[in-house]
Amino acid sequence: MKTLVIATKNQGKFLEFKKMLQPAKFSIISLHEFPDIDIKETGSTFDENALIKATTVCQKIGLPTLADDSGLQVDILNGEPGVFTARYAGEHATDKENIEKLLKNLSGVPLDKRQAQFVCSLALVFPDGKTFLEQGTLEGLIALSPRGTGGFGYDPVFLVPEINKTFAELSANEKNNISHRAKAVEKIKKHLFKHMQEEEVENRRIE
């Protein structure tokens, strides 16, 4: 295995994955290398969408592919925005527009009633058909207003109560130590590295 494709065109997300997968004995590329690939996320769950993305890209490119479907679930909004996290305010909504809609829908709700979870489903698909699926979650609260300048997406309003900081107030290293994505990556890495070892053994046998 020489190359792993991260099935995203989101540069912030790609850089997070690249950092969390280090040290890697393979190159890591994103869908920026394949601009013609368009994926329709038709699943009703994070798991389904992650599998759709990873399987589609792996079949089209013929390389091992890692795909995630991550999102925000707010308890008092019955799990919204859920699988519509990235397009909560519309198909081509900006992060700012999505946050504004979320805060509007939570208007008047006190902080202690704004429980939420960040969820990350990760699918790893190999050209030989082997498929692995893992999930990571992080509990938090939706802040009353945006705080911080880092991160992307809903990071400015996702508050981690234990440290009283939003994701956007954390450094990249701090975020990667606790995030839903980091938890899912730690689980999927076991499958990734095991497959690499098996591949190395098979290659030596053939030689």
Image (cartoon, rainbow, N blue to C red):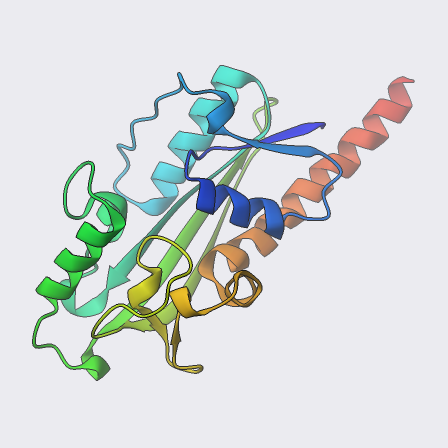
Q: In this orientation, does residue 122 appear? A: no
The quadrant holding residue 151 is bottom left
**60 shown above or below 185:** above
| Residue at image point 53% right, 17% down | 61
Q: Is residue 77 left or right of residue 41?
A: left
Q: Is residue 14 left or right of residue 153?
A: right
Numbered circles on residues, count: 0
**65 shown above or below 178:** above
- Image coordinates for residue 133, horizontal then vertical, percent: 50, 44
Question: Image quadrant for the N terminus?
Answer: top right
| Residue at image point 26% right, 60% down | 73
Q: In this orientation, does residue 128 appear? A: yes
| Residue at image point 29% right, 33% down | 41
- Viewer-nearest residue: 180 or 92: 92
Q: Is residue 70 left or right of residue 116?
A: right
Question: Image quadrant for the C terminus?
Answer: top right
- Image coordinates for residue 35, horizontal then vertical, percent: 42, 20
- Image coordinates for residue 148, horizontal then vertical, percent: 36, 68
**186 shown above or below 33:** below
